[in-house]
Structure formats: structure tokens, C-alpha cells
Amino acid sequence: MSEYDEPFEMDDDDDSFALEDAEELIAQVIDDGDTSLELGHLSLPVVPASLAEATALTRLDLSDGTFTEVPGFLGALTGLTHLSLSDNRLEELPASLGNLGALTEFVLNGNRLAEIPIWVRQLTELTDLALRDNRLTELPEFLGGLKKLTCLDVGSNRISAVPTSLGDLAALSELDLSGNRLVEIPRTLGNLTALTELNLDFNRLAELPASLGELAGLTHLLLGSNRLTRLPAELSGLTALRWLNLDRNELTELPPWVGGFTGLTGINLGFNRLTALPGTLGGLTALTSLSLRGNRLTELPASMAGLTALTSLDLGDNELTDLPAWVADLPALTSLRLDGNRLSRAPRWLADHERLVVHLGEGRVLRNDP
């Protein structure tokens, strides 16, 4: 390893400079009566004590530091509405933060928190709570009492169960539970009728509750990297969907009712066990991106000729021996992936298709720019 490969570590001098810079910014904010303070760019080793005097603050960013504890005096900054402590080394938080009753946005991503403290239930004005990439193993029932929450992100933790009380969050529009250890989700999530985005990627779900079909306003549904073998018919009611991710599951068929998602612009069906596709797929006339990679398809339905908005089509790693001629007539298509199939040759018409980049595998690319 050369000297240039050594990992970068901040030394004591750098710590001192960072604290000096922070003290100057804090003093200026106090003198000017400013309400917003950004210290996230300084990689602070500790929280400066002078912050206790910045009582006019409503927004405070202490992200991207290296400190392991938060001083209790932050709980005296009761005017705060936005507080970010992301990307530090926090394992716990002082109970005094429960005094921040005006807080609407609380960002704690990228720390080492193993639980959500009980005093968080006192923060009843919260609209955004972010705890992504921590060490949470469970979610407390009291989260259902934060009635003003619109965004809850607890992705990339170690959560194995979701409390039924989350179904009480009537204002919730975005819920991220991705990257956890969930084997099931409660049917009460079907009560979240304001929900527009639901991310359940990278869990261990083998089935979904039928109640999810009640989420009529859902525009983004992410179910990738689970263990799903089927989709409940009730999901046919999700007609507002714009993006659907189902990659890396164990689906053997795609239900015909998916063709009713006429507003869908993207769908990822990669790495399942599909051997055929329903003819209704051609009804997705708003679709711009379609991935079918890593399935067991031997042919494509002729109805797909109706996908006139499609710009990207990934057919890689299937069992296709021929490519239907209608692919040549897809007017918006600019990217086509065919690698890993059983095509003996690329159809001649591909070479004449304007603006189309065709990936044939082994580094072979046909590029036709006018």
C-alpha cells in the first residue's frame, strides 16, 4: 500500500480547526439573530458548548461529524423545528431532546442507535422522522401516536416486525421499511390511505396482505428482493401506480390485471421465474422502462407492440431464440438489452433502427445514431 492509499483520519489539529470554525459560525449566528445554522460540513468531533446560547435557532444541522454523544443542553433550544444529527456515531440520545416540542423534522440517519427512545412520543409536531442505517431491531407501538407524520424512513436496519399501530398514521405519505428483516407486514398498513410511496425492498416477505389494495393513492410500490411467489388480486386496485419494482422475487406468473396500471411508467420484473407474460401487458401505454432480465421467457406477447412510450427494454438472460419484428416499430425505444439469450444472430433490422443502442453481450454493442 502506498502512502496515497492510507485511509484518511482527522488529527487533533483538524479537530481544533473544525471547532474554531464552528465557534465563529455560532457567534455570528447569535450576533445576527439568525435562525438557521449549518455545521454539517465541519466533521465536528464534539458538539460545541456555545450552541447553548443560540436560542433563536429553528434549523440546526450537526450531521457528518464524529461525535458519540449529544449534550443535554440541545433540549433547551425549544424553537428548533428542524434538527439533523445524521452520520455521526451516536448510540443513544439525551432525554432532554423530548423538550423540543416544536420539532417537525428529526433526521438521525447513519448512526448506531439500537432503539427509538420513548421520549420521541412527546414530539407530536413531527412530520418527518428519519432513522435509516442504524441498528434498530424493532419499532415501538408509540410511533402510531405521532399523528402528523408524513414521512417515516427506517430503512437499512435490523427490524423483524412492524407494530400494528403504524396503521394509525393517517397523514403518512411516504413509508420506507426497506433493507430490514421483515417476514410479514400488518394488514393495518392498508389504513394508510394518504400513502403515495411504500418501499419494502430487501426484506424476507413471502406474501402480502390483501389490505394493501386499499392504498388507492399509491404511486411507488417497491417490493424487490423478497420471497414473493404471487401477488394478491386485491393489488389490482392500485391504479395510481407510476413505478412498480418486483425484481428478485420468486414469481412464476404476472397476473393479467397488471395491464390495468395504465399510468405506470416503469416496472422491474427482473430475476423472477416468469415463463410467459400476459397479453394485457401491452395496455401499459405510458410505460417508458421495462426490465424482464433473468427470467425464463421463450417468447414475448404481440400486444407489447403497443408500448409506444417505451425507451428502455431489458430482455437479457432469458431463453429467447428470436426477436419479434414489432420491436423494430417501437418508436421511442433507445436502449435494448439482449445479452444472455439464445439468439443465433441479431435481426438485420436492428442495424437500421435510428437512435437505438443494442447490447448483445460480451461487450458487443450496436449503436445507431442518426
Image (cartoon, rainbow, N blue to C red):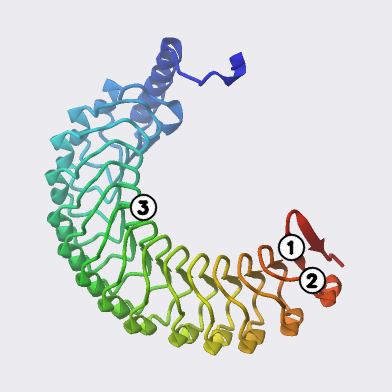
- Residue 222 x/y as whole percent: 41, 65
Identified by mark 1, the residue type is Leu
Circles 2 and 3 in contact, beta carbons < 8 Å:
no
Residue behind mark 3: 179
Quadrant in which residue 147 is drawn? bottom left
> Which of disc 3 and disc 1 is earlier in sequence?
3
On screen, residue 138 versus residue 33, left or right, reads: left
Q: Amino acid at mark 2?
A: Ala
**Does the residue at mark 1 contact the one at mark 2 (Cβ under 8 Å)?**
yes
User: Which amino acid, by three-letter code, is at mark 3?
Assistant: Gly
Quick one: label 1 or label 2, which is nearer the N terminus? 2
x and y percent of residue 130 in the render?
A: 31, 49
Query: Count of labels shown?
Result: 3
Q: Nearer the viewer, residue 252 or 83?
A: 252
Q: In the image, is residue 130 above or below residue 293? A: above
Q: Which residue is mark 1?
A: 360
